[in-house]
Amino acid sequence: MKMKLSHLFVIASLVLVGTTIQAESLVDGTADAGKQRALTCTACHGPEGNSSNPMWPNIAGQSASYILTQLQAFKDGSRSDSLMSSQAMMLSDADMANLAVYFESLPAAVQSVADEGLIGRGEALYRGGNKEAKVPACLACHGPSGRGNPAAKYPALKGQHAMYTAKQLNDYANSTRTTDGKTHMMRDIAENLDKDDIAALSSYVQGLK
C-alpha cells in the first residue's frame, strides 16, 4: 500500500529534526581491513572512492550504514546490478562492514557546479518539494547540504554524479530499484517526478558541497 503524502511529510520532518552529526561510524568495522579488501572496488569507484565514470557512484564519504545496507541488498538479491551483485556475493559480513567503514573515512568528492540553467528548478524541488505533484522536499531526509542521515540510513547526495543520480531516480520510478522497502517512499516520490524534474534535481545535488 502506498503511503499518503501527509505521512511522507511527517516522516521527513521528524528525520530532519532528529538529524545529528555522527562523531564515529555506526558500523562495527575497521577501515584498515577495508582498505586491504578494497582493491577490486577501486577499479570502478576510483582509488579514493570517487569514480571517473559518471554512471558509477562516488562512495567516498558516504555513510557506512548506508554502504553496508546496499552491499547486503546486492548480496541477498533485493537490489540487482550485473557488476555489483556478483562482487557482493564474494563478500563476508565482516568484509562488507570493513569496506563500509573504509569508504566512509575517505574525503567526499567535490563535483563541478550544477548546470546554471537547471539550478532554479532543482533547488526549488530539493528545498521545497512540490505539494501539487506530491513530492516532499529532498532536504528533509538528505539534509540541507545533501549530507544524508546515517542513523536513518539515508544516503549523502552531495557531489554525486548527476547521471548516476538520474538513473537511480528513474529506477525507483519504474520499480526497477526497490530498496526503499515496504514504505515505497522513494518509489512514490520518484514516480511523481517528470524527466525535467529528475534532470534538475540530479544536476543540483551534484553541485552541493
Image: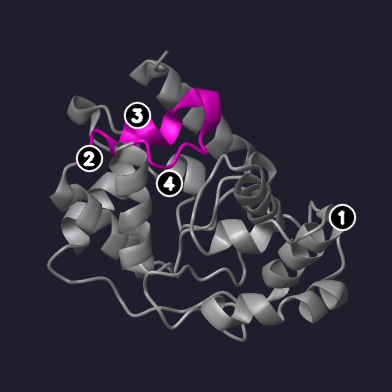
Location of mark 4 (residue):
139
The verdict on residue 191 being magenta is: yes
Location of mark 1 (residue):
28
Of residues 119 and 73, the one drawn nearer to the viewer in this rendering: 73
Q: Secondary structure at mark 4?
A: helix
Mark positioned earlier in the residue sequence (1 or 4): 1
Three-letter amino acid code at disc 1? Asp
Quadrant for the N terminus in the image: top left
Labels 2 and 3 touching (C-beta < 8 A): no
Q: Secondary structure at mark 2?
A: loop
Task: Tell me residue 36's x, y (percent).
Answer: 81, 80
Asked if residue 169 lies left or right of residue 72, the reply is left
Three-letter amino acid code at disc 3? Asp
Location of mark 3 (residue):
188
Q: Secondary structure at mark 1?
A: loop
Q: Secondary structure at mark 3?
A: helix
Q: Is residue 7 above or below residue 175?
A: above
Mark positioned earlier in the residue sequence (3 or 4): 4
Q: Which mark is residue 3?
A: none
Label 3: how many residues lie within 10 Å, few (<14), some (14-19) or many (20+)?
many
Q: CA distance from mark 1 to mark 4?
A: 28 Å
Specify start and end residues of the magenta stretch as a single range: 175-193
Location of mark 2 (residue):
193
Q: CA distance from mark 4 to mark 2?
A: 16 Å
Task: Tell me residue 119's x, y (percent).
Answer: 21, 63
Labels 2 and 1 touching (C-beta < 8 A): no
The verdict on residue 153 being magenta is: no
Indicate the quadrant where residue 151 lies.
Answer: top right
Indicate the quadrant where residue 39 lies.
Answer: bottom right
Mark positioned earlier in the residue sequence (2 or 1): 1
